[in-house]
Image (cartoon, rainbow, N blue to C red):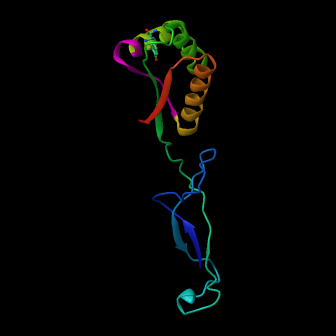
Amino acid sequence: MIRVSKGGQRPETCLVVAGLDFEEPQQVKLAGDKEKKEDQGGGDTGTQVITKPRTKAKKPRLYKVLLLNDDYTPMDFVIFILEQCFNKSRSEATGIMLQVHRSGIGICGVFTYEVAETKVSQVMNLAKQSEHPLQCTMEKE
Ligand code: TYC
């Protein structure tokens, strides 16, 4: 008997790499397995846990990267951030900056977890280097 993964939550340690995902343990019989062998007490049960790659790619969760308004960060710096880190055109960047300036918060983009985390770090590092209090954060879509 061998346990393979199928359906449901993925294990904590699981990585999603190039569309491959892993599935929750499920028992699968292989040729030569003896019926109920592992249920008959002690010793090596002949049971192992393996993970079987999922054939269908699961959609990754997405995260919004948000900019917060403050009274001190120059508007030009926010536009620069939106152009450099989020590949916005000058006019898109100006629109988002003004939206944040007027409403207090705005969306720079929507990304997978790791990409969103990287963008937030880049923005925070650039703001820190330039000694601006600009805040950037991420939130589940
Ligand atoms: N409110 C800032 C100012 O008047 C501009 C600003 C816009 C700051 C967006 C942060 O995320 C921000 N200089």
Q: Is residue 39 above or below residue 62?
A: below
Depth check: give the residue in front, 138 or 62: 138
Q: Where does the image place residue 72, in percent across and percent down from the top left?
A: 47, 12
Q: Is residue 40 above or below residue 82?
A: below
Depth check: give the residue in front, 76 or 32: 76
Give yes or no for residue 103 being in the magenta stretch: yes
Quarter that holds the N terminus: bottom right
Q: Where does the image place residue 49, in percent across and percent down from the top left?
A: 60, 71
Depth check: give the residue in front, 73 or 6: 73
Q: Where does the image place residue 114, in percent across and percent down from the top left?
A: 58, 38
Q: Where does the image place residue 77, in percent across and percent down from the top left?
A: 55, 11
Q: Residue furthest left?
A: 103
64 left or right of 122 in image? left
Which residue is rendered at x = 53% and y = 67% of the image? Answer: 25
State the image quarter where residue 85 is shown: top right
State the image quarter where residue 119 is shown: top right
Which residue is rendered at x = 53% and y = 11% of the image? Answer: 79
> Quadrant location of ligand 1?
top left
Which residue is rendered at x = 37% and y = 19% of the image? Answer: 104
Quarter that holds the C terminus: top left
For the record, the magenta segment spans 100-111
Q: Is residue 91 above or below residue 26?
A: above
Give yes or no for residue 73 being in the magenta stretch: no
Which residue is rendered at x = 50% and y = 26% of the image? Answer: 136
